[in-house]
Image (cartoon, rainbow, N blue to C red):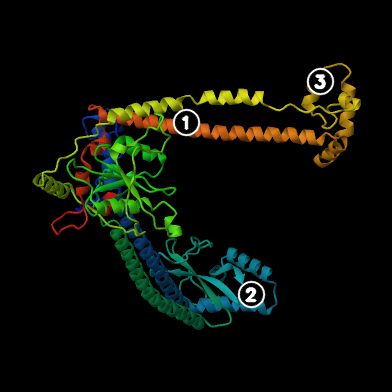
Amino acid sequence: MSRKNPLYKEGEDSSDVLEYIYDEFHPYEPVHKKTDKTRFEAVKGYNKTLDKFFTTIESTKTSLTRQQQQATAEKRLQHVKDEQSSKINKLTAVQELNKKKAELIMLYNQPIEECKSSVQALIDQQMDWKTMERLIETEQQRGNSIAKMISLPLNLLKNEITVKLPDNEDEDSADETESESDSDSDSDSDSDTDTGTPRLQSKKKDKIIEVKIDITQSAFANSARYFDAKKVAKDKQAKTEKNANMAIRSTERKIAQDMKKLEKQTKQVNELKHLRNKYWFEKFYWFLSNDGYLCIAGRDNNQIDTIYYRHFDNQNDILVSNDLDSSLKVVIKNPYKNKDITPSTLMQAGIFSLTATKAWENKMVTSPWFVKGTEVSKKDFDGSILPSGLLNVSKEKTYLPPCQLVMGIGLLWVGTDETSQKYKAAKQARDEELEFKLVSGDENAAMKVLELKSMIEKLGNLEKPEADYKVVSETLEPKEESSVVPEELKEKPEETKPPGPNDQAKVTIRGKKNKLKKIKQKYGDQDEEERRLRMSVLGTLKQVEKKSADTTEKSSTQVSIDRKLRKKQQEANQLKKLLDELNETNNADGEDAEQATVKEPSHLQVSGLIPSPNKTDQIVDWKECC
C-alpha cells in the first residue's frame, strides 16, 4: 500500500518527484484503508514483496530528502518575503493614517481650537485633572458638542488631548484606529455648532478617527507635525523596500548554495548498489607475488588451523616461515601440479613471514625457511594432535638466503563481471597453451577431518581435570598448626570479631545469649586496626593471615584454571565449527556463497584482480567494493 506524497505537485513532470510512496505491506488487500490518497499494488510471493518494498524505499530515500529540502527552502523564502511585505504594509498604513489625521485637523481646525481653548481655560483655573475629566464627562452627557469631541482620559502630563474627528471621505480604510462615538448621535445628528462650524456629528456609519493634539501648538502646527511624520514613514519605507530586496536576494543565494551542496551529496544515481562478495582469502593476511601466486597467513591460532584444514593442499602448497618468535606461517598456493614455485615468490613469502617478528625493531637479518606441504602435519612425533596454531615439520627445513627487511604496498582494481571474465579467460588460455596441469582438490581432506575429530575429542573432556583438581586440592590442603590457646580464648572463640545480627539470630543454645551480649558490648565499637592489634597481642594474627593467604592463593589458582578451561572450550568450539564447514564443503548438496567462491581455483580468482587496468576495462566503483 502506498500513500500520496504530500510534496507532490500536479504540474511537475520530474522523475525525481514521486506521486506515491510505499507505506505498508499486507498479506491481503486492506480494504478498510482504501481512500482517495492511497493506492494498492499486488506482488506475488512474500520474498518478492519484501524485496520490492524495502528496495523501493531505500532507492527513493534520497529523492524524498531532496523534495523535503526544496519544500523547506521554499518555506524559508516565502517567510522572508512575507516578513518584508508586512513591514512595508505597516509603513504604508502609517503614512496613510498620518496623512488622514493631518487633513482632518486642517478640516476641523475651528472645533479643535475651541477644544484647546476650553481645556486651557480649565488649566488656567488650576483645576484638578480628575475634576477636569469629570466636568468634561458631565458636559458630554448634557450634549455639549465641543465636549463630545474630547476623548477621555486626558494626557495633560504631555500637554496632549485626544479629539474624535469623523472621517466622511474614506470609509474603507483598513489600518486606521477606529472607535465608536460615546455620544448620543441619534438625538443630535441634525444640529450644528453655534459658531457656524462644519457639522461635527456624523451618521452611525461614519468612522471616527482619534487624533492627538498638542494644546501648546495651533491646529495647523499639529497638522504639520502629522505631515512630517508621514514624510518620515515614507523615507523609512523606501529604506525598508531596499533592504527587503537585498534580504530576499541574500536568502535566495543562500538557498541556492544549500541546494547545490545537497545536489553534490546526492549526485550519485539513486540506485541500490550491490556489495561485492569478498574473496575467501581477505580475512587472512595475504598478498600476490610478482609471479601471480597467492600467499596467505593466519592472523591468530584459529586462522592458522583454518588455513591448514580448509585451504592447505599438502601435495602442492608450500609453507614458509622462520625461527623467530611470533613469525607468520605463510602458505603459498600452487595451482599447478607440474610447475614449481619460483625462488622470487619464496623469498617474498619469507620476507612477509618476518613482518610480525621483532626483526624489524631489532634490525635483525635472518634466513627464512620453507618446506613442502607433504612434510607438514598437525600430528606430533608421538602421534597425538598438536594444539591450535602449531604445525609439525617432519623433515629438514630448506633455508633461504638472508633477506632484506623491505615491504611495499600495491593497488588492485576490481573489474565488472565482464572484465573479470575476460581476464580469467585469458589466464585459462595461457595455462592451456603452456600445458599446465591444474590441481583438482585436496586429497588429504578425509585425513584432516579425522584429525579434527580427534582434537575435538581430546578437548572434550574438560570437566574431568577440574574435578580432579578439586579432589587433589582438598587432599593436599595444609592443616592448621596446633598452638597453645588459653582457656579464655577457647571459651570465647568469637571474641576477636563481634557477631552480627544474623549470627545472633542463629544462636539458639541456652546460656549463650548473655555471653554474646557481653561480647557485643565489649567489641561492638572497635575498628579493623584495633581488631588486628588485639589479635597481635593474643598471638592469633599470624594464623588468621596465613589462613586468608591460603584462601586467596587457592582462589587465584582456581581463577587461573577456569580461565584456561574457558580458553580450551573456545578452541573446541572453533574446531567444531571448522569441522562443520569442512563437512559442508565436502557435501555437494550444501554450498553457500563463500564455499562456491572457494571452490573456484585461487589462481582464477586472483586473475580477476587487475593491477594495471586498460582503457577498455570497466572498474567497479570503490563504494561498491566496501
Q: Are marks 3 and 2 in contact (CB under 8 Å)?
A: no
Depth-wise, is mark 3 or mark 2 nearer the camera? 3
Q: Which residue is mark 2?
A: 157
Q: Position of residue 2 (x, y in %)?
A: 27, 39
Q: Is residue 201 visible?
A: no
- Label count reads 3
Q: Give the residue type at disc 3.
A: Val
- Image point (23%, 29%), residue name: 45
- Residue 69: x, y in percent? 33, 56
Tag nearer the camera, 3 or 1: 1
Query: Is the residue marked by circle 1 packed among few (<14), some (14-19), or many (20+) residues within 10 Å?
Result: some
Few, some or many C-alpha atoms within 10 Å of disc 2 (few <14, some 14-19, many ≥20)? few
Which quarter of the picture shows residue 544?
top right
Residue 433 makes an appearance in the image = yes
Q: Secondary structure at mark 2?
A: helix
Is 282 or 33 nearer to us in this picture?
Answer: 282
Mark 1: amino acid: Gln
**Front in this rendered view, residue 316 or 212:** 316
Q: Residue at x 35, y 56 (%)?
A: 402
On screen, residue 546 versus residue 132, left or right, reads: right
Three-letter amino acid code at disc 2?
Leu
Using the numbered discs, state the Cα–Cα distance from disc 1 to disc 2 in whole angstroms: 97 Å
The circle drawn on residue 507 is: 3
Tell which of 340 and 302 is nearer to you. 340
Judging by the rendered image, the residue that carries numbered circle 1 is 569
How packed mark 3 is, by other alpha carbons closer than 10 Å (few <14, some 14-19, many 20 or more), is few
- The quarter in which the N terminus is drawn is top left
Q: Nearer the viewer, residue 396 or 6?
A: 396
Earlier in the chain: of badge 1 and badge 2, it is: 2
185 sits to left or right of 616: right
